[in-house]
Amino acid sequence: MLLDGRSRRRPRRRYTRKFCAGDGAESKFAYNFLAHPAWLISSRDSQPGLSMETLLSLLFPLLGYFSGSLPFSVWVTRYAKGVDVRNAGSGHATTTNTIRQAGFGWGALVAILDVAKGFVPTFLASKYSGETWVIVLTAALAVAGHCWPVFAQFRGGMGIAPFGGALLATNWVSAFVGLGLLLALLFTVRHGARASVLTGILIAPLFWLLNFRGIEMWIALACGLVMAYRFLIDWNRKYRELWLDREKPHS
Protein backbone atom coordinates (compact mmCIF):
# COMPACT_ATOMS: atom_id res chain seq x y z
CA MET A 1 0.00 0.00 0.00
CA LEU A 2 1.12 3.61 -0.71
CA LEU A 3 1.00 6.41 1.85
CA ASP A 4 -2.25 7.80 0.41
CA GLY A 5 -3.91 4.38 0.74
CA ARG A 6 -3.91 3.51 -2.93
CA SER A 7 -2.92 0.03 -3.98
CA ARG A 8 -0.02 -0.67 -6.31
CA ARG A 9 -2.34 -3.10 -8.14
CA ARG A 10 -4.32 -0.38 -9.92
CA PRO A 11 -1.60 0.82 -12.33
CA ARG A 12 -0.88 -2.80 -13.23
CA ARG A 13 -4.58 -3.42 -13.93
CA ARG A 14 -4.73 -0.36 -16.21
CA TYR A 15 -1.62 -1.55 -17.99
CA THR A 16 -3.17 -5.01 -18.25
CA ARG A 17 -6.33 -3.64 -19.84
CA LYS A 18 -4.31 -1.60 -22.30
CA PHE A 19 -2.08 -4.53 -23.11
CA CYS A 20 -5.01 -6.86 -23.58
CA ALA A 21 -7.28 -4.50 -25.50
CA GLY A 22 -9.47 -6.32 -27.96
CA ASP A 23 -12.67 -8.30 -28.22
CA GLY A 24 -11.25 -11.75 -28.93
CA ALA A 25 -11.09 -14.73 -26.61
CA GLU A 26 -7.30 -14.47 -26.59
CA SER A 27 -7.50 -10.94 -25.19
CA LYS A 28 -9.90 -11.99 -22.40
CA PHE A 29 -7.67 -14.91 -21.48
CA ALA A 30 -4.57 -12.69 -21.41
CA TYR A 31 -6.35 -10.15 -19.20
CA ASN A 32 -7.45 -12.77 -16.68
CA PHE A 33 -4.02 -14.39 -16.76
CA LEU A 34 -2.18 -11.15 -15.98
CA ALA A 35 -4.76 -9.46 -13.75
CA HIS A 36 -5.07 -12.48 -11.44
CA PRO A 37 -1.57 -13.94 -11.39
CA ALA A 38 -2.13 -17.08 -9.31
CA TRP A 39 0.63 -18.55 -11.43
CA LEU A 40 3.08 -16.14 -9.74
CA ILE A 41 2.51 -17.73 -6.31
CA SER A 42 5.65 -19.55 -5.31
CA SER A 43 5.39 -23.29 -4.77
CA ARG A 44 7.14 -22.57 -1.49
CA ASP A 45 3.94 -20.89 -0.22
CA SER A 46 1.84 -24.00 -0.84
CA GLN A 47 4.44 -26.49 0.31
CA PRO A 48 3.54 -26.45 4.06
CA GLY A 49 -0.08 -27.41 3.38
CA LEU A 50 0.90 -30.20 1.02
CA SER A 51 3.56 -31.45 3.38
CA MET A 52 1.14 -31.54 6.31
CA GLU A 53 -1.45 -33.40 4.25
CA THR A 54 1.14 -35.91 3.13
CA LEU A 55 2.38 -36.30 6.70
CA LEU A 56 -1.11 -37.02 8.00
CA SER A 57 -1.74 -39.47 5.18
CA LEU A 58 1.41 -41.40 6.11
CA LEU A 59 0.70 -41.29 9.83
CA PHE A 60 -2.10 -43.86 9.77
CA PRO A 61 -0.23 -46.48 7.70
CA LEU A 62 2.74 -46.14 10.04
CA LEU A 63 0.40 -46.53 12.99
CA GLY A 64 -0.97 -49.65 11.30
CA TYR A 65 2.46 -51.23 10.91
CA PHE A 66 3.65 -50.46 14.45
CA SER A 67 0.34 -51.59 15.90
CA GLY A 68 0.58 -54.84 13.96
CA SER A 69 4.16 -55.29 15.15
CA LEU A 70 3.14 -55.59 18.81
CA PRO A 71 3.97 -59.28 19.48
CA PHE A 72 1.27 -60.08 22.01
CA SER A 73 1.60 -63.85 21.65
CA VAL A 74 5.33 -63.62 22.39
CA TRP A 75 4.75 -61.43 25.44
CA VAL A 76 1.82 -63.45 26.77
CA THR A 77 3.47 -66.86 26.52
CA ARG A 78 6.67 -65.48 27.99
CA TYR A 79 4.67 -64.10 30.91
CA ALA A 80 2.51 -67.19 31.37
CA LYS A 81 5.04 -69.96 30.75
CA GLY A 82 8.43 -68.31 30.51
CA VAL A 83 8.96 -69.52 26.93
CA ASP A 84 9.11 -68.00 23.48
CA VAL A 85 6.04 -69.15 21.56
CA ARG A 86 8.08 -69.29 18.36
CA ASN A 87 10.45 -71.94 19.69
CA ALA A 88 7.88 -74.74 19.52
CA GLY A 89 4.82 -75.85 17.61
CA SER A 90 4.47 -74.10 14.27
CA GLY A 91 7.26 -71.65 15.08
CA HIS A 92 4.90 -68.70 14.52
CA ALA A 93 3.61 -66.05 16.92
CA THR A 94 -0.05 -66.94 16.51
CA THR A 95 -3.15 -67.57 18.60
CA THR A 96 -3.08 -71.29 17.85
CA ASN A 97 0.55 -71.60 18.83
CA THR A 98 -0.22 -69.72 22.05
CA ILE A 99 -2.93 -72.30 22.75
CA ARG A 100 -0.37 -75.05 22.25
CA GLN A 101 2.09 -73.46 24.66
CA ALA A 102 -0.08 -71.72 27.27
CA GLY A 103 -3.65 -73.01 26.94
CA PHE A 104 -6.98 -71.79 25.61
CA GLY A 105 -7.41 -68.93 28.08
CA TRP A 106 -4.19 -67.21 27.16
CA GLY A 107 -4.84 -68.01 23.51
CA ALA A 108 -8.22 -66.27 23.67
CA LEU A 109 -6.55 -63.18 25.15
CA VAL A 110 -4.00 -63.15 22.35
CA ALA A 111 -6.76 -63.53 19.75
CA ILE A 112 -8.59 -60.45 21.09
CA LEU A 113 -5.42 -58.38 21.21
CA ASP A 114 -4.38 -59.45 17.70
CA VAL A 115 -7.80 -58.55 16.30
CA ALA A 116 -7.47 -55.14 17.97
CA LYS A 117 -4.15 -54.60 16.20
CA GLY A 118 -6.00 -54.49 12.90
CA PHE A 119 -9.21 -52.89 14.16
CA VAL A 120 -7.84 -49.81 15.95
CA PRO A 121 -5.61 -48.28 13.24
CA THR A 122 -8.10 -49.07 10.47
CA PHE A 123 -10.94 -47.52 12.46
CA LEU A 124 -8.89 -44.38 13.14
CA ALA A 125 -7.91 -44.08 9.48
CA SER A 126 -11.56 -44.48 8.44
CA LYS A 127 -12.73 -41.84 10.90
CA TYR A 128 -10.05 -39.19 10.53
CA SER A 129 -8.74 -39.67 7.00
CA GLY A 130 -11.54 -41.00 4.82
CA GLU A 131 -9.14 -41.54 1.91
CA THR A 132 -9.59 -45.00 0.48
CA TRP A 133 -5.91 -45.59 -0.23
CA VAL A 134 -4.94 -44.49 3.29
CA ILE A 135 -7.43 -46.86 4.92
CA VAL A 136 -6.45 -49.80 2.72
CA LEU A 137 -2.72 -49.20 3.20
CA THR A 138 -3.22 -48.87 6.97
CA ALA A 139 -5.03 -52.22 7.12
CA ALA A 140 -2.48 -53.96 4.89
CA LEU A 141 0.45 -52.68 6.94
CA ALA A 142 -1.23 -53.79 10.15
CA VAL A 143 -1.34 -57.31 8.71
CA ALA A 144 2.24 -57.01 7.44
CA GLY A 145 3.39 -55.77 10.84
CA HIS A 146 1.79 -58.79 12.48
CA CYS A 147 3.58 -61.12 10.06
CA TRP A 148 6.95 -59.33 10.13
CA PRO A 149 7.04 -57.35 13.39
CA VAL A 150 9.83 -54.86 13.95
CA PHE A 151 9.56 -55.47 17.71
CA ALA A 152 10.13 -59.24 17.44
CA GLN A 153 13.00 -59.73 14.96
CA PHE A 154 10.50 -59.79 12.07
CA ARG A 155 9.30 -63.26 13.15
CA GLY A 156 5.59 -62.94 13.77
CA GLY A 157 2.22 -64.43 13.04
CA MET A 158 0.25 -65.21 9.91
CA GLY A 159 -2.10 -62.23 9.61
CA ILE A 160 -5.55 -63.74 10.08
CA ALA A 161 -6.51 -61.92 13.30
CA PRO A 162 -5.54 -58.35 12.28
CA PHE A 163 -7.10 -58.98 8.86
CA GLY A 164 -10.36 -59.79 10.61
CA GLY A 165 -9.98 -56.73 12.81
CA ALA A 166 -9.56 -54.46 9.78
CA LEU A 167 -12.75 -55.87 8.24
CA LEU A 168 -14.61 -55.41 11.53
CA ALA A 169 -13.58 -51.75 11.54
CA THR A 170 -15.19 -51.12 8.15
CA ASN A 171 -18.00 -53.66 7.75
CA TRP A 172 -18.56 -56.25 10.47
CA VAL A 173 -20.75 -58.38 8.20
CA SER A 174 -17.89 -58.78 5.73
CA ALA A 175 -15.65 -60.00 8.56
CA PHE A 176 -18.01 -62.88 9.28
CA VAL A 177 -18.35 -63.67 5.58
CA GLY A 178 -14.57 -63.91 5.37
CA LEU A 179 -14.48 -66.13 8.45
CA GLY A 180 -17.12 -68.38 6.89
CA LEU A 181 -15.05 -68.68 3.71
CA LEU A 182 -11.97 -69.63 5.73
CA LEU A 183 -13.81 -72.29 7.74
CA ALA A 184 -15.47 -73.73 4.62
CA LEU A 185 -12.11 -74.07 2.88
CA LEU A 186 -10.47 -75.42 6.02
CA PHE A 187 -12.92 -78.29 6.37
CA THR A 188 -12.82 -78.89 2.63
CA VAL A 189 -9.07 -79.10 1.99
CA ARG A 190 -8.23 -80.22 5.55
CA HIS A 191 -5.06 -78.15 5.59
CA GLY A 192 -4.80 -74.89 7.52
CA ALA A 193 -2.10 -73.17 5.46
CA ARG A 194 -3.58 -74.07 2.08
CA ALA A 195 -7.05 -73.04 3.19
CA SER A 196 -5.62 -69.68 4.33
CA VAL A 197 -3.80 -69.12 1.03
CA LEU A 198 -7.00 -69.83 -0.90
CA THR A 199 -8.96 -67.56 1.42
CA GLY A 200 -6.54 -64.70 0.83
CA ILE A 201 -6.91 -65.11 -2.93
CA LEU A 202 -10.66 -65.69 -3.10
CA ILE A 203 -12.02 -63.33 -0.47
CA ALA A 204 -12.00 -60.16 -2.60
CA PRO A 205 -13.78 -61.82 -5.58
CA LEU A 206 -16.31 -63.29 -3.14
CA PHE A 207 -17.00 -59.84 -1.70
CA TRP A 208 -17.53 -58.49 -5.21
CA LEU A 209 -20.01 -61.28 -5.99
CA LEU A 210 -21.89 -60.62 -2.73
CA ASN A 211 -22.02 -56.88 -3.50
CA PHE A 212 -19.54 -55.89 -0.78
CA ARG A 213 -17.91 -53.44 -3.15
CA GLY A 214 -16.94 -50.67 -0.76
CA ILE A 215 -13.77 -50.16 1.21
CA GLU A 216 -14.03 -53.67 2.63
CA MET A 217 -13.42 -55.19 -0.81
CA TRP A 218 -10.17 -53.26 -1.27
CA ILE A 219 -9.07 -54.17 2.25
CA ALA A 220 -9.83 -57.81 1.44
CA LEU A 221 -7.76 -57.59 -1.73
CA ALA A 222 -4.71 -55.98 -0.10
CA CYS A 223 -4.74 -57.88 3.19
CA GLY A 224 -5.69 -61.13 1.49
CA LEU A 225 -2.62 -61.00 -0.73
CA VAL A 226 -0.37 -60.30 2.26
CA MET A 227 -1.90 -63.19 4.20
CA ALA A 228 -1.72 -65.58 1.24
CA TYR A 229 1.94 -64.78 0.69
CA ARG A 230 2.70 -65.31 4.37
CA PHE A 231 0.99 -68.71 4.51
CA LEU A 232 2.94 -70.03 1.53
CA ILE A 233 5.76 -70.82 3.96
CA ASP A 234 3.57 -73.57 5.45
CA TRP A 235 2.13 -74.89 2.18
CA ASN A 236 3.81 -78.29 2.61
CA ARG A 237 3.51 -78.44 6.36
CA LYS A 238 2.18 -81.68 7.84
CA TYR A 239 -0.84 -81.26 10.11
CA ARG A 240 -2.03 -83.85 12.58
CA GLU A 241 -5.17 -82.00 13.63
CA LEU A 242 -5.80 -79.04 11.33
CA TRP A 243 -4.15 -76.07 13.06
CA LEU A 244 -3.63 -77.23 16.62
CA ASP A 245 -1.29 -80.13 15.87
CA ARG A 246 -2.12 -81.81 19.16
CA GLU A 247 -1.39 -85.45 19.58
CA LYS A 248 -4.53 -87.53 19.34
CA PRO A 249 -5.19 -89.75 22.37
CA HIS A 250 -4.19 -93.37 21.95
CA SER A 251 -7.08 -95.82 21.82
Image: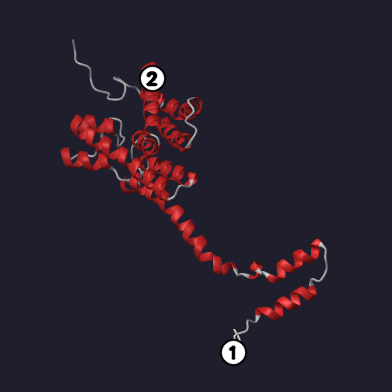
Counting from the top left corner in percent of width and height, residue 88 is at: 26, 33
Note whether 55 is above or below 118 in the view shown: below
Which of 212/111 is in front?
A: 212
Element type where label 2 sits in the image = helix
Counting from the top left corner in percent of width and height, residue 9 is at: 66, 78
Residue drawn 23% across the image and 39% down it: 84
Residue 33 relative to residue 162: left or right: right
Label 2 belongs to which residue? Answer: 184
What amino acid is labelled 2 in the image? Ala
Would you call the spot at circle 1 few (<14 residues within 10 Å), some (14-19), or many (20 or more)?
few
Element type where label 1 sits in the image = loop
Label 1 belongs to which residue? Answer: 3
Counting from the top left corner in percent of width and height, residue 229 is at: 45, 34
Would you call the spot at circle 2 few (<14 residues within 10 Å), some (14-19), or many (20 or more)?
some
Can residue 236 be seen at all in this image of the molecule?
no
Identify the image quadrant of the N terminus.
bottom right
Note whether 27 is above or below 167 in the view shown: below
Identify the image quadrant of the C terminus.
top left
Counting from the top left corner in percent of width and height, residue 93 is at: 30, 37
